């Protein structure tokens, strides 16, 4: 179960499928309540803050043209490289 704008995107690294943890909460997807995801994240206005593979907090840099998120274990993802990024 994935939520937010990353639901149908296949990318390597911290947001690769199958995700085990919520990228906005760090909580295991099996136990995460939909109400735990912030509304701005549900609208796609927030960058992911946690690695979907391990649940660790990621280093996130927000830029005028998007964002970059890096997990110390699973690598980096850049929003400008995602197919459906606006």
Image (cartoon, grey):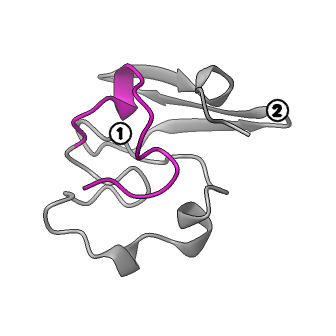
- The residue positioned 62% from the left and 68% from the top of the image is 40
In the displayed structure, 17 sits above or below 24; it is above
Decide which of 71, 42 is in the foreground and name it: 42
- In the rendered image, residue 53 lying in the magenta stretch gets the answer no
Q: Position of residue 84 (x, y in %)?
A: 62, 35
Q: Position of residue 3 (x, y in %)?
A: 39, 58
- The residue positioned 25% from the left and 60% from the top of the image is 27
Q: Which mark is residue 18?
A: none
Q: Position of residue 72 (x, y in %)?
A: 37, 24
Q: Which residues are magenta?
A: 1-19
Q: Is residue 2 left or right of residue 6?
A: left
Quarter of the picture containing the N terminus is bottom left
Quarter of the picture containing the C terminus is top right
Q: Quadrant of residue 80?
A: top right
- The residue positioned 21% from the left and 36% from the top of the image is 18
Residue annotated with mark 2: 65
- In the rendered image, residue 18 lying in the magenta stretch gets the answer yes
Residue annotated with mark 1: 51
Crowdedness near tag 1: few (<14), some (14–19) or many (≥20) residues, C-alpha within 10 Å: many
Crowdedness near tag 2: few (<14), some (14–19) or many (≥20) residues, C-alpha within 10 Å: few
């Amino acid at each position: 179960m994935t939520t937010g704008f990353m639901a149908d995107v296949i990318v390597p690294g911290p947001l690769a499928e199958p995700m085990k943890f919520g990228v906005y909460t760090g909580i295991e997807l099996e136990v995460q309540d939909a109400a735990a995801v912030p509304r701005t994240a549900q609208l796609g206005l927030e960058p992911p803050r946690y690695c979907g593979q391990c649940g660790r907090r990621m280093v996130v840099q927000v830029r005028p043209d998007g964002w970059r998120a890096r997990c110390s274990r699973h690598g980096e993802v850049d929003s400008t490289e995602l197919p459906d990024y606006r």
